[in-house]
Image (cartoon, coloured by chain):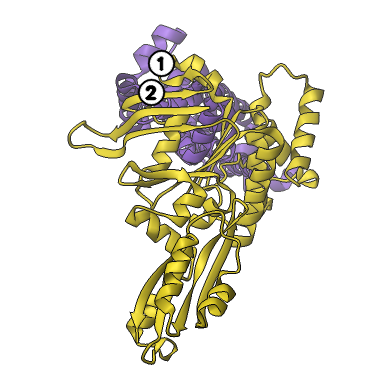
Chain colours: A purple, B yellow
Amino acid sequence: MADFLSSIIPNVMEKPDLLWKAFLQTIQMVGIAGGISLVLGIPLGVLLFTTKPGGILQNRPVHLVVGKFCDIFRSIPFILLAVMLLGLSRLIMGTAIGVKGAIIPLLFGTIPYLARQVEGALAEVPDGLIEAAQAMGCSPREIVWRVYLRESIPGIARGVTITLISLINFTAIAGAIGAGGLGNFAIMYGHGKNQPDISVVVVLIIIVLVSLIQAIGNQIVKRSTH
Amino acid sequence: MIQLEHVSKTFGGAESGVHAVRDVSLKIEAGEIFGIIGYSGAGKSTLVRCINLLERPTEGTVTVDGRELTRMPERELRQERKKISMIFQHFNLMPSRTVAQNVAFPLKGSALTAEQQAGKVKALLELVGLPDKAGAYPSQLSGGQKQRVAIARALASDPKVLLCDEATSALDPQTTRSILRLIQDINRKTGITVVIITHEMAVVKDVCQRVAVMDGGRVVEMGDVFSIFSTPREAVTRSFIATTSNLSKVEELIEAGSPMVELKPGEMIVRMTYTRKNVSEAIISDISRRFGIDINIIYSNLEVIEDAPLGGLVAILSGDRVQEALEYWTSKNVRAEVLKRG
């Protein structure tokens, strides 16, 4: 088996420990940045949706500021965003390289994206449900928790799924500018040292990761739709 | 129980805006079933939302159970709303929750323990005839069943008022009747005050005691259902009544020159309608015998509203003493209109 693998992916088999390390770094980046994105992105999406004109917490200035924040950061290509945020990353995290240095740019890439996804998911909740909840005497806070978030679990799960998948994409780009991880590994060896089997294996691993996230997302959507 | 005084609601600016409700004052007594009827756009849905302040009136005051809602801060108003339940045309059940969870929705934060809540949900589902659907999701129910669940949910907070916004408009006639029966039952058992918004006169006729007719944002006519049906004043009221009766179809027949309404000399087509509750005599055979008149009935439409007959018939009358017969009817509180003479 090992002989066989050595014959088709010789360069990978030479440094499995490096591949493993790169894999762990990618998982770390996706886990940490993904976790923080959920914690910040979902409330931001709720804020974006509920403060819009006619929303239950209608507030023009807040809506405008949050909306612009999302649009600006979503329109900057991630490779530029990562470079622009090097300074901020050094300031907050103390470093601009490695997994630690990648977290800040990744957050700025994913949070606005997720916030817009959540906003879209909440917009799918029929107005009649909100009216019914108001007629039952629910406060805006209760309406957010008990109606908007609860009823849009499938929509939010879809949004989180595609956000995490683009986060994997972002980690690969971050790898290109010194963040480590699978992207860095593939660029350094597959491209830099002309070892194409490394690129192929990295791509296969990423395909498996993405498929796994998509499958979990689909399951959540399926189980929460009645 | 509910008192609206000079309530107006304008959407948009004061001048350029849409006047959905204009200067409506009405009083709904505790325990009654009150209908508000109007065509779409008449302002009835806005008016009913002014009762629980889902729409805040631009002018006027709303008082429910002796408390003036229009003066209350938001927080206090939310507490009052728990006593004013509402059901909707499209049911508005929470799709992600089971039937039991939907019914329990308003109970969250109440003083009841989890066990008491479960008991209450069970009792409510029995009341609306769905004891076996507790674990089902709304998507698995028919329209009528969904509305029953919505009614159970509406009753969970022990409200004093039930607002029904076109609650039967998405249902077929049979289901409509069964939902109306249920509402009537609950009204009789609990004494809850019911306000029914509808565009169907049949609904008003079926369950309401009093009715307000809305047109162009105003209440144009109001009274007990029997007198509105028997002596409508406004054209819009008459057009609603016509939808529940076939007595007006004879005009179409006359216009179309149908052979059914061709007259010989001396014959006439007469429409007679009851106008008072005390009519229970055999008025047809009576005039036939008394004045020697032949009566050929074309249409008849009799309803029993509030335990009194309402409606009338269209017939071809012939005989020498027809005029006397018509006067006799008038003296008996039967209105007679001659539609065509031969």
Q: Is residue A204 visible?
A: yes
* Residue drawn at point x = 53 percent, y = 73 percent: B300
Distance from disc 2 to disc 1, alpha carbons, whole Å, reads 8 Å
Where does the image place residue B70, in percent across and percent down from the top left? 41, 20
Which element is circle 2 on? strand
* Residue B322 occupies quadrant: bottom left
Instruction: Depth check: give the residue in front, A101 or B314.
Output: B314
On the image, the x and y values in percent for residue A40 come to 49, 20
Q: Are marks 2 and 1 in contact (CB under 8 Å)?
A: yes
Judge left or right: residue A215 versus residue A48: right
User: Mark 2 falls within which chain?
Assistant: B
Looking at the image, which is closer to me, A80 or A196? A80
- Disc 1 marks which amino acid? Arg
Q: Which numbered disc covers residue B61?
A: 2
Please tell me how many numbered marks the rendered image carries: 2
Is residue B139 at all visible to an observer of this figure? Answer: no
Q: Quadrant of residue B339?
A: bottom left
Which residue is labeled 1 in the image? B71
Amino acid type of disc 2?
Thr
Q: Residues within 10 Å of mark 1 (few under 14, many from 20)?
A: few
Q: Is residue B294 above or below residue A45?
A: below
Residue drawn 79% across the image and 35% down it: B123
N-terminal of the pair, mark 2 or mark 1, is 2
Picture residue at 32% right of the left edge, 41% below the top: B218
Q: Nearer the viewer, residue B51 or B108?
A: B51
Marking on residue A92: none
